[in-house]
Amino acid sequence: MIRIVIIDGQDSDRSKVEFILSEHQDFRVVGVGKNGYDALSLPNHCRPDVVLLDINLSDIDGVRAISILKCRSPKIGIIIFTSIEDDESVFKAICNGASGYLLKNTDPEELVEGIRMVNSGGCFMAPQLTPGVFRMVSRLARNPSGAVSKTNSPTPDAAAFPPNLSRTDLQIIHYVGQGLENREIAANLRLCIGTVRNRMSVILQKISLRDRTQLAIFARQYGL
């Protein structure tokens, strides 16, 4: 049984994919979400084998979400399922850890094949996107520094960064962004787990966030 989470901001697209997958006995949809918060929280709870992820999300760049998910669960298979087909988006998604990239107008049979292939450890890409990836790779070979810079996250606005975060706060945020639990953070920083737990509450208050998932998004947005 292949456990699948679907993240898509369009209700109609989510319903369509759910219907397609429901016709296959070896598929089980274990979670459905519509935004970046869902993309980062549902896989923790649902433990999917494959995540179908639209990178066009309202509250986080879907490409950044890929890297967070792969840090937390390196074995998870991520397939980008989106209407965005520009070369740079495809290349960034692959560099951040996606194993598949399909367009929403793909045939259902191709979607099913892609899920099975990625679940088995392979990679799958819509055929019409392959030439663009080769162009990006060729550009990287000719001009490594220029091409690599395009795959990095944009530099955050320094003026918008909260000024009241201590060095320890930044270290904790960094580890949360890497997907570490409080116990692991405490071991890395040589702190008591209770201290980490208390600092986490203080950090969330300082930057007006609700929970550690939002804090992980914050970490990625500011390159922490």
Image: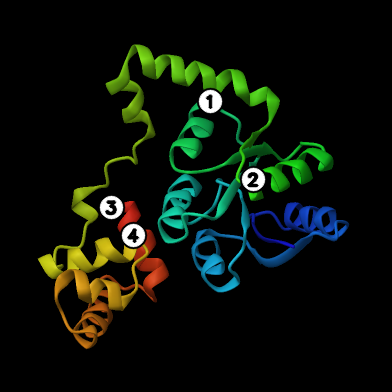
Sort mark 1 into few (<14), some (14-19) or many (20+) by Cα contacts within 10 Å.
some
Q: Amino acid at mark 1?
A: Asp
Q: Position of residue 146 (x, y in %)?
A: 31, 21
- Disc 4: CA contacts within 10 A as few (<14), some (14-19) or many (>=20): some
Quadrant where the C terminus sits is bottom left
Three-letter code, disc 2: Val
Rendering coords of residue 216 (x, y %): 36, 63
Determine the CA span between mark 1 and mark 2.
21 Å
Which element type, helix, strand or loop, lies under badge 3? loop
- Mark 3 lies on residue: 222
In primary-sequence order, the first of circles 4 and 3 is 4
Helix, strand or loop at label 2? It is helix
Quarter of image, res 81? top right
- Residue 101 image label: none
Q: Which residue is mark 2?
A: 118
Find out whether the residues at labels 1 and 2 contact each other: C-beta distance under 8 Å.
Answer: no
Q: Is residue 181 visible?
A: yes
- Which mark is in front, 1 or 2? 2
Identity of the residue furthest to the right in this view = 23
Q: Residue at x 11, y 65 (%)?
A: 167
User: Disc 4 or 2, which lies upstream in sequence?
Assistant: 2
Q: Position of residue 220 (x, y in %)?
A: 34, 54
